[in-house]
């Protein structure tokens, strides 16, 4: 497949010049010991690396990059590894999501400004995947994704235990008096015991599945554990393949079509994937110029059944998923729902890639006619409480709460929530609806993963494990519950969520896609008059972010980053 769009070997605009500038570009690079013929016109492959010791999920990426380099050299290319901002989900405050767009700018400008013909994206922890895809999409060079792979299953006292999901579960047990703090702490070293990213079907695993279902990686990219040597082999093959992609000028825009996004949305439903994928795919599509909106998620994906029995929707973990056949086995089950002829980075169609796929464990990957959860894709809710939409993940919710009417208990911020939730005098019971305000893109800022608010102890002590919760926040992909998220417009913009008061009645009806605040228009208008916009950050990136971030239903990208500028950079540096 040869693409006639553009001349090959963009890097020759640097290294191919027979003048002073060519001397400068070549000579300084040679201080690393490269012979002259490395720069003689062979494809230069950038390896975009999110390695950082502060991003534990990506801590093995320097080693992984070495395998990519092997493959690039084998195929006749010249690899150059470069770092970009890394986002560690468990370390970065106030939330890694605040910096997704900043990291994407770093990626975009690093790719465009440097002499490379193709790019390998090394991605793992939650936000590193969308940040790299967004930045690379705005350049549109030949690009291939390589995920870092999940950790091995957590093991605690003879039981499998999953990243995040196990933490939320055990911390509720501590609060309910069912587990001691000492036992809880003892689990720390057992939950995360190998390199790799979270091994539940959280956001990192979901986004790795999105990369594979979009066709942007080689098959098997999503499930192979980081500690499995087959991951290194995949890295080497990825390095070989990107050189071929450069030779054939296969670009991101050749792969990231509307059909590819539809495949990813349906796959997300089939894997019981994270709600965070909604925001990230909308943002990536926005960079690529592919029309995609929030309603597409419901229309295309909500009736797809969940087949993958992984936490948080189910029982198993990513290591089990790999041994059961991984994503190709899932995509084979839902092939009639997919665009089978969509092209992928290896030059084969989706159908060709999954032709040989097999399922080796039917309890982990269910058959299409015997799903884990029917109609499990993301549901998009609308109503006077969320005029531009909100989302819920039915596969992680309690069936009896999917239609529920309850009295609002409102928390104006996450600090307000933490201050009052353990108060035995808090007027709340299991029928109430917990409402959290000011945690959206502008409000937090950065739209933190706080939407899965822990339940009050007095409810937990009754043995109740779920209540309806509503917010403009996100939740961790490892979390579960009847949690309405991404309410848009958010409270910090004066959206109706800001106008909810204690005691208001709210109706959630997922089947009808309805989220309704039972308060008259007159009362809401009065409350709106009294509403005051929260103070904005005074300086720095947070100021830029708050002034330009779009709402959740648009993907929460910065408004001036939407779209792409290609890879051309006509001016030289000296
Ligand atoms: Fe990095 Fe979960 S904290 S993937």
Image (cartoon, helix red, strand yellow):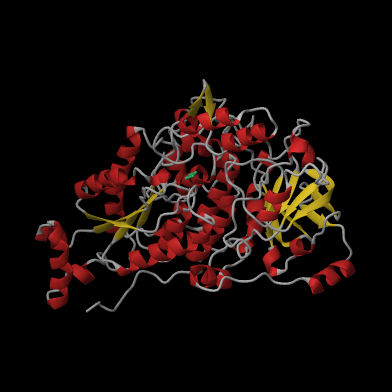
Residue in the foreground of this view, choosing between 399 and 239: 399
Against 8, residue 220 (above or below) is above
Count of numbered labels shown in the rendering: 0
The quadrant of the image that shows the N terminus is bottom left
> Residue lying farthest left?
36
Question: Which residue corresponds to the image point at 63% horizontal and 63% vertical from the top-left?
Answer: 443
Residue 49 spot, x, y in % from top left: 34, 53
The quadrant of the image that shows the C terminus is bottom left
- Please identify the quarter of the rendering in which residue 175 is found: top right
The reply to whether residue 563 is visible in this rendering is yes
Residue in the foreground of this view, choosing between 21 and 77: 21
Question: Which residue corresponds to the image point at 31% horizontal and 69% vertical from the top-left?
Answer: 113
Question: Which residue corresponds to the image point at 36% horizontal and 56% vertical from the top-left?
Answer: 143
Question: Which residue corresponds to the image point at 82% horizontal and 46% vertical from the top-left?
Answer: 432
- Please identify the quarter of the rendering in which residue 251 is found: bottom left
Residue in the foreground of this view, choosing between 505 and 257: 505
């Amino acid at each position: 497949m040869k693409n006639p769009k553009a001349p090959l070997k963009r890097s020759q605009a640097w290294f191919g010049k027979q003048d002073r500038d060519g001397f400068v570009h070549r000579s300084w690079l040679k201080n690393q010991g490269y012979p002259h013929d490395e720069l003689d016109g062979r494809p230069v492959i950038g390896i975009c690396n999110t390695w950082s010791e502060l991003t534990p999920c990506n801590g093995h990426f320097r080693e992984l990059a070495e395998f990519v380099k092997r493959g690039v050299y084998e195929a006749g290319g010249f690899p150059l590894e470069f770092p970009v901002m890394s986002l560690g989900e468990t370390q970065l405050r106030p939330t890694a999501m605040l910096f997704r767009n900043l990291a994407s700018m770093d990626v975009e400008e690093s790719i465009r400004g440097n002499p490379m013909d193709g790019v390998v994206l090394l991605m793992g922890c939650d936000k590193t995947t969308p940040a790299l895809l967004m930045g690379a999409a705005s350049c549109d060079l030949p690009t291939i994704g390589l995920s870092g792979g999940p950790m091995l299953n957590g093991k605690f006292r003879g039981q499998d235990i999953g990243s995040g999901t196990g933490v939320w579960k055990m911390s509720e047990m501590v609060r309910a008096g069912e587990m001691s703090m000492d036992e809880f702490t003892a689990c720390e070293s057992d939950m995360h015991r190998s390199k790799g990213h979270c091994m539940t079907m959280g956001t990192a695993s979901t986004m790795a599945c999105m990369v594979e279902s979009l066709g942007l990686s080689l098959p098997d990219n999503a499930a192979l554990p980081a500690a499995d040597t087959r991951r290194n082999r995949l890295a080497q093959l990825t390095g070989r393949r990107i050189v071929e992609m450069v030779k054939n000028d296969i670009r991101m825009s050749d792969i990231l079509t509307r059909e590819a996004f539809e495949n990813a949305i349906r796959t997300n439903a089939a894997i019981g994937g994270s709600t965070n994928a909604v925001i990230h795919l909308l943002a990536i599509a926005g960079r690529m110029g592919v029309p995609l909106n929030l309603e597409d998620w419901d229309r295309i994906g909500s009736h797809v059944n969940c087949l993958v029995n992984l936490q948080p929707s189910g029982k198993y973990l990513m290591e089990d998923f790999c041994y059961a056949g991984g994503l190709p086995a899932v995509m084979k089950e839902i092939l009639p729902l997919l665009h089978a002829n969509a092209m992928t980075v290896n030059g084969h169609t989706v159908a060709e890639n999954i032709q040989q796929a097999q399922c080796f464990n039917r309890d982990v990957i269910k058959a299409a006619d015997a799903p884990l959860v029917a109609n499990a894709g993301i549901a998009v809710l609308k109503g006077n409480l969320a005029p531009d939409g909100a989302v819920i993940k039915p596969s992680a919710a309690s069936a009896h709460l999917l239609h529920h009417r309850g009295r609002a208990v409102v928390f104006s911020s996450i600090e307000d929530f933490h201050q009052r939730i353990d108060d035995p005098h808090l007027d709340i019971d299991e029928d109430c609806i917990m409402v959290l305000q000011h945690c959206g893109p502008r409000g937090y800022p950065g739209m933190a993963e706080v939407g899965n608010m822990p339940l009050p102890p007095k409810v937990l002590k009754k043995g109740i494990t779920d209540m309806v919760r509503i917010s403009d926040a996100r939740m961790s992909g490892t979390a579960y519950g009847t949690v309405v998220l991404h309410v848009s417009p958010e409270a910090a913009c004066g959206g109706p969520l800001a106008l909810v008061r204690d005691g208001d009645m709210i109706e959630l009806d997922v089947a009808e896609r309805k989220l309704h605040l039972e308060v008259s228009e007159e009362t809401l208008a009065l409350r709106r008059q009294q509403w005051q916009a929260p103070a904005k950050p005074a300086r720095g990136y947070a100021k830029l972010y708050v002034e330009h971030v779009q709402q959740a239903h648009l993907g929460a990208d910065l408004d001036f980053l939407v779209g792409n500028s290609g890879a051309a950079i006509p001016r030289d540096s000296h």
